[in-house]
Amino acid sequence: MGNYASVYGDYTHVIFVRLNNEGNENNFVKGNAWNKTADLKISDLNGVYTINGWELEVE
């Protein structure tokens, strides 16, 4: 089981965010977002990234 995402366009980096499911908006504001990963370089991911824990708390 897992979640999957596709990145379209000329993006070079991605940040995965764990959002509060009670919020009305999807943004990085504390309270709406609980945790996030570091700014990940897509070319370093080799098509897969497994979140084993969250690197950063939302500020």
Image (cartoon, rainbow, N blue to C red):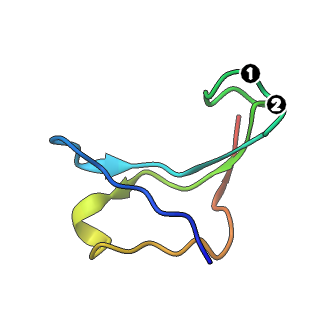
Q: Which quadrant holds the C terminus?
A: top right
Q: Residue 23: give x, y in percent of width and height.
A: 78, 27
Label tally = 2
Q: Residue 49: give x, y in percent of width and height.
A: 44, 72
Q: Please state which amino acid type lies under the numbered disc 2.
A: Gly
Q: Residue at x 55, y 64 (%)?
A: 3
Choose top left, top right, bottom left or bottom right for residue 54.
bottom right
36 is higher (above) or lower (below) than 30: below
Residue position for label 1: 24
Q: Residue at x 68, y 70 (%)?
A: 53
Q: Residue at x 15, y 42 (%)?
A: 10
Pointer 1 with pointer 2, Cβ within 8 A: no
Number of the label disc, if any, that sits on residue 31:
2
Choose top left, top right, bottom left or bottom right for residue 21.
top right
Q: In front of the other: label 1 or label 2? A: 1
Q: Please state which amino acid type lies under the numbered disc 1.
A: Asn
2 is higher (above) or lower (below) than 11: below
Observer-nearest of 34 and 20: 20
Q: Is residue 23 left or right of residue 15?
A: right
Q: Earlier in the sequence, mark 1 or mark 2?
A: 1
Number of the label disc, if any, that sits on residue 50:
none
Q: Residue 7: give x, y in percent of width and height.
A: 30, 50
3 is higher (above) or lower (below) than 13: below
Per the image, label 1 sits on a secondary structure element best described as loop
Per the image, label 2 sits on a secondary structure element best described as loop
Observer-nearest of 51 and 8: 8
